[in-house]
Amino acid sequence: MSPAATATAYLRAAFQPDWDPGHDDPGRRGFLASDPRVRTLLRVLVSYSEVRFVVPDRVGLEPTADARLVETIMRFIGRQGWLVSGVTLG
C-alpha cells in the first residue's frame, strides 16, 4: 500500500459541463444524477466495501484501501467520458 493511498480519503471527479454538480438542472448532480447510467455507476461504486460514501463530486474511500483498488476505481470512473473529464486523488 502506498503512502498516498493511505492518506487519501476520497477521489474527486471533474464532470463534463452538463453533468457538473453546480449545473442548473437538479436532475444532473454529478454522481447523484437521476440518469439511469449514473445510477448504475453509483451501484457499482458502492459495491466496493472500501467505498465509504458518494457525494455529487467525490467518492470517499476507507483510508486502508489498497492502492491497486484505488487505481482500478480511478480508471473505471475515468472511462466514463460521457460523465467525467477527469478523476484525481483528493
Image (cartoon, grey):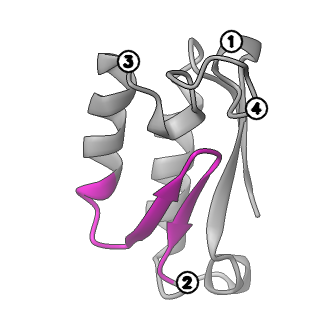
Relative image position of residue 85 (x, y in whole percent): 73, 24
Q: Nearer the viewer, residue 76 or 90?
A: 90
Mark 3 residue element:
loop
Tag 3: amino acid: Asp
**Dots 2, 4 in contact, CB < 8 A:** no
Residue under pointer 1 = 18
The answer to which of marks 3 and 2 sits earlier in the sequence is 2
**Tag 3 near tag 2, CB within 8 Å:** no
- Residue 50 appears left or right of 33: left
Element type at marker 1?
Answer: helix
Instruction: Give the residue at x 27% y 44%.
Output: 44
The residue where tag 2 is placed is 1
Query: Relative to 35, is 49 above or below?
Result: below
- Name the residue that disc number 3 marks: 35
Amino acid type of the residue that numbered disc 1 sits on in the rendered structure: Asp
Segment tinted magenta in the rendering: 46-62
Residue placed most toward the observer, 36 or 88: 36
Element at label 2: loop
Number of the label disc, if any, that sits on residue 52: none
On the rendered structure, is 16 left or right of 71? right
Marks 1 and 4, how far apart in space? Answer: 9 Å
Q: Residue 71 colored magenta?
A: no
Reading the image, the residue beneath label 4 is 22
First in sequence, mark 2 or 4: give its number. Answer: 2
* Mark 1 burial class by Cα count in 10 Å: few <14, some 14-19, many 20+: some
